[in-house]
Amino acid sequence: MGGYFTDLFTGTKSLLDGMWVTLKEFPRRPVTLNYPHESVKMYPRFRGHIELIGDKDGKPNCIVCSMCQRACPSGCISLAGVKPEGEKKKVLSRYILDFTTCSLCGSCVESCNFNALRFSNEYNLASTRKEDFIMDLLQRLEEQNR
Ligand code: SF4
Ligand code: SF4
């Protein structure tokens, strides 16, 4: 009989403890997000894949010096430029990143002296297709400025 009352007491106490925790947490703001409908705001030092930086008109700051390409230990940057007729400077015509081999080391960003390259805040990159990680960064910059 004593065991019955002990069990009853323990069970009721545990139930009340659980309800108290629920009650305490109920008014608090949730720490989770309604993913994928909501996105986490990334921290400034977060390293997503690299991306091009554009000027106020959306044109890339890149002067096609190829320093980033040379600095990349994994050979994942491929870029090209063209010299329009009558112009002295080259214009970036192609900038492809193979993110499948990028180690996010940052050598490319550090090597750029023209404020043309940075890490993006992109973290939502899940895909089963390898091709999705071959990124056209020039096209991405154009899309961002539309
Ligand atoms: S180092 Fe900078 S300016 Fe030079 S090619 Fe790379 S992104 Fe362009
Ligand atoms: S972060 Fe490193 S590995 Fe990735 S593209 Fe830049 S230099 Fe190459």
Image (tube, rainbow, N blue to C red):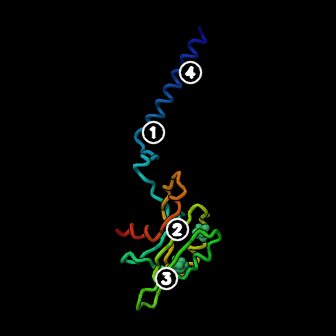
- Quadrant where the N terminus lies? top right
Distance between mark 4 and mark 1 Cα atoms: 23 Å
Q: Residue at x 37, y 70 (%)?
A: 145
Residue at numbered disc 1 = 25
Q: Which residue is drawn at 42% across and 38% down?
A: 26
Q: Position of residue 92 (x, y in %)?
A: 47, 79
Front residue (pair 45, 93): 93
Please state if 119 lies on the left or on the right of 54 as rendered: right
Residue at numbered disc 3 = 63
Distance between mark 2 and mark 4 Cα atoms: 57 Å
Counting other residues with Cα less than 10 Å from the Cα at mark 4, is it few (<14), some (14-19), or many (20 or more)? few
Residue at numbered disc 2 = 50
Of callouts 2 and 4, the N-terminal one: 4
Q: Where is residue 82 in the image (x, y as percent from the top left)?
A: 47, 82
Q: Does the residue labelled 1 lie within 8 Å of ligand 2?
A: no
Q: Which amino acid does label 1 sit on?
A: Glu
Distance between mark 3 and mark 1 Cα atoms: 54 Å
Q: What residue type is labelled 3?
A: Ile
Of callouts 4 and 3, the N-terminal one: 4
Of discs 4 and 3, which sits in the foreground? 3
Q: What element carries label 3?
A: loop
Q: Does the residue labelled 2 lie within 8 Å of ligand 2?
A: yes
Q: Which amino acid does label 2 sit on?
A: Ile
Q: Where is residue 58 in the image (x, y as percent from the top left)?
A: 38, 75
Distance between mark 2 and mark 3 Cα atoms: 17 Å
Front residue (pair 70, 129): 129
